[in-house]
Amino acid sequence: MAEYVAIIEDAGSDDAVSVWFPDLPGCISGGDDVDEALENAPEALAFYAQELIADGRQLPVPRTLDELKADPEVADDLRNHTVALIEWPPLAESTE
């Protein structure tokens, strides 16, 4: 199972929260608060994966947090925002 680093950007107390993936350009999630944005993140990742597969491509291998910290294009965002790890593929929900 892979874990993609997600960057959480909280726009303020009354604004939406966005989550984006440095390794997945254009893959974003959002919500009214951090919990909702993180809850929606696996679904955004699934849609992104479906689009890549439809184009005959695969999800890139996720970089580690240390690798991303060494990337000057991402390092500032990592320092200035909260980071979460999103598992892929997500664990299957239990069926009762």
Image: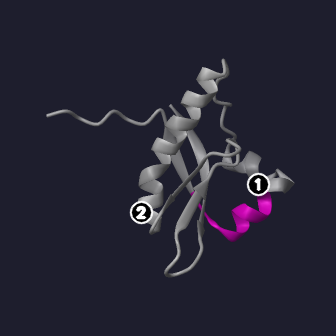
**Quarter of the rendering occupied by the C terminus:** top left
In the image, what residue type sits under mark 2?
Answer: Asp
- Which residue is outermost to the right? 72
The crowding category of the residue bearing disc 2, from other C-alpha atoms within 10 Å (few below 14, some 14 to 19, many at least 20), is: few
Main secondary structure found in the magenta portion? helix
Give SS at disc 1.
helix
Q: Position of residue 82 (x, y in %)?
A: 60, 65
Query: On the image, which quarter does residue 72 sit in?
Result: bottom right
13 above or below 79?
below
Region of the chain picked out in magenta, as a range: 74-83
Most foreground residue, 73 or 27? 27
Give SS at disc 2.
helix
Q: Position of residue 5 (x, y in %)?
A: 61, 49
Marking on residue 35: 2
In the image, what residue type sits under mark 1?
Answer: Lys
Marking on residue 43: none
Left or right of 26: which side holds 70?
Answer: right
Left or right of 21: which side holds 93?
Answer: left
Marking on residue 69: 1
Query: On the image, which quarter does residue 90 sit in?
Result: top left
Q: Nearer the viewer, mark 2 or mark 1?
A: 2
- Residue 78 on the magenta segment: yes
